[in-house]
Amino acid sequence: MSDNSSLSRRLLLAFSLPAVMQGLMHAPEFQVQGIYAKYTGLSLTALAGAILLTRLFDAITYPLIGHWSDLSFRRSGSRKPWIVAGTVVTVCGIWFLFRPSQQPSITYYTLWAMVSYVGWKLTEIPYAAWSLGLTRDYVQRTRVQLWLTMGALSGTLLFFSVPFAAKALGLTDSTELNLQTLSLTAVLVLACVPLINLYSLASVPNGEAASPVPRAGSTGSWRELVRAMAGNRPLLRLLAATVPVILLNGFSTGTTFLYVDVYLHLGKQLPLIQLVGLPLTLLGLPFWGWLCQKFERHRVWAVSLVAAAACNGVMAFAPIGQAGLYLMLALYPITLFCVVCMFIAVPAMIGDIVDDDRLRTGEDRAGVYSAIYAFLCKSLITVAGACGIALVGWFGFDATAGQQSAWGAFGIKLVTVGLPALGFAASAPLIWRFPIDRARQREIREAMRALETRGAGSPPLNPGDRQRDVAEA
């Protein structure tokens, strides 16, 4: 695969198949606790404590796995062994987490949830880093992320189709999400995940960025890593734009149900609102993917943020009752349509940052940077959701009341639509001036190719020699 080649659809399909399985396993991630509470008798307080413990565990394991996978990639030029190990741990964890006994203990849930999460991270962080190094081409990198996002969403749809397929086959009596649904999903995971992951590993090469050019004196230490990240201006700008979006929008994940059901009194129409949003989300993937290939992807993302901010801001004025239904049916799906752009643009931008970092330092930190992004999207958003619920409670919102106080109404609107709008609007101008555009990425790619050609068969470069060769390249 040269820089100018177009990745074949067959290769992209083989590479994105593990993402389908990841979507299948992650889809019930936020339903598992409720299913355990309803069908096994575990208390919500105990389950909440277990979730908090696993998220604290994430803060340690995400950077460790990302850093260790980078170190091993530095020696071998491949991230595939990590995915093999992660597949084994994932299948084991999911089998026991999704197939509990009738009365499991909270220790049982916590243990197997942690095993599953560790398995996911062992697989998904190297897999994401692999996707960044699969190609250095600006357009092709966008295509890779588009296929991965579509794969993950397809896996989500696959999970929610399990109850309907099981009922049609006579395996269950209802289409409820219950322990039986989880058990059938565990069987699918055991049967499909190892085979699909191995097929992808065997079919897809390590990628263009599989031969790091390290500099002399580099130790791969944590101090060196922190110093490099602190001096990485494109990374810092991307984080400054991404964190407000994830954090403030994350508040609404815990309060959207309360806003629509309790405040607007549209509980019966909530499934309809979600149902209208799903097709637009699906349409948003190819739409934003096409725009990110045709124009500067950081500016496409900035435009989507402005549109999402406008929709959220207007939703704050939705009237209570049936009159608010039409506004929610129009604006909530459009917001989802706009937000999905992030999941295509940001990973591709991280790939550009990794290339820039490799050019300047000779180190490939795709694992660490992928781990940071995964932590923000999966752990920070969960904590933010819990904070959102606490914040509306502090404002005096009462989930059991038919009518809210003035402060309660203000609090639910602020947290559910106001703060996300603020996060979107604040991040748009930051990311609009992202320093790595299409032309700069092409310069980085050509300089890397020249530097790697010059460094083939040579000893590692010391910092002074590398700076000279980078300037010449």
Image: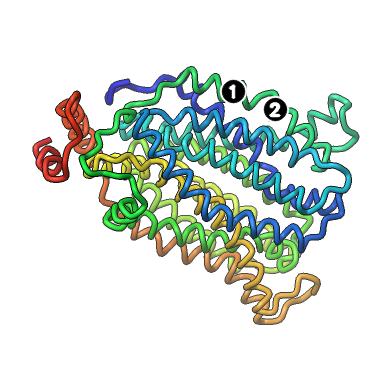
Q: Secondary structure at mark 1?
A: helix
In this rendering, position of residue 354 left or right of residue 197: left
- As rendered, which of 75 and 307 lies closer to the eye? 75
- As rendered, which of 164 and 200 lies closer to the eye? 200
Marking on residue 244: none
Where is mark 2, residue-wise? 190
Q: Secondary structure at mark 2?
A: helix
Residue sitting at 90 percent across and 34 percent down? 173
Image height check: is 408 above or below 11? below
| Spatial CA span between label 2 and label 1 | 11 Å
Coordinates of residue 326 in the picture (x, y in percent): 66, 57
Coordinates of residue 445 in the picture (x, y in percent): 23, 34
- Give the residue type at disc 2: Leu
Which quarter of the figure has residue 170? top right
Coordinates of residue 59 in the picture (x, y in percent): 52, 55
Is label 2 in contact with label 1 (beta carbons under 8 Å)?
no
Residue sitting at 30 percent across and 52 percent down? 224
In this rendering, position of residue 135 left or right of residue 122: left
Disc on the earlier residue, 2 or 1: 2
Please, which residue is most extreme toward the right here? 173
- As rendered, which of 222 and 373 lies closer to the eye? 222
Q: Nearer the viewer, mark 2 or mark 1?
A: 2
Coordinates of residue 90 in the picture (x, y in percent): 63, 36
Q: Residues within 10 Å of mark 2 (few under 14, many from 20)?
A: some
In this rendering, position of residue 339 left or right of residue 72: right
Marking on residue 196: 1
Residue sitting at 40 percent across and 46 percent down? 369
Residue 188 visible to the viewer: yes
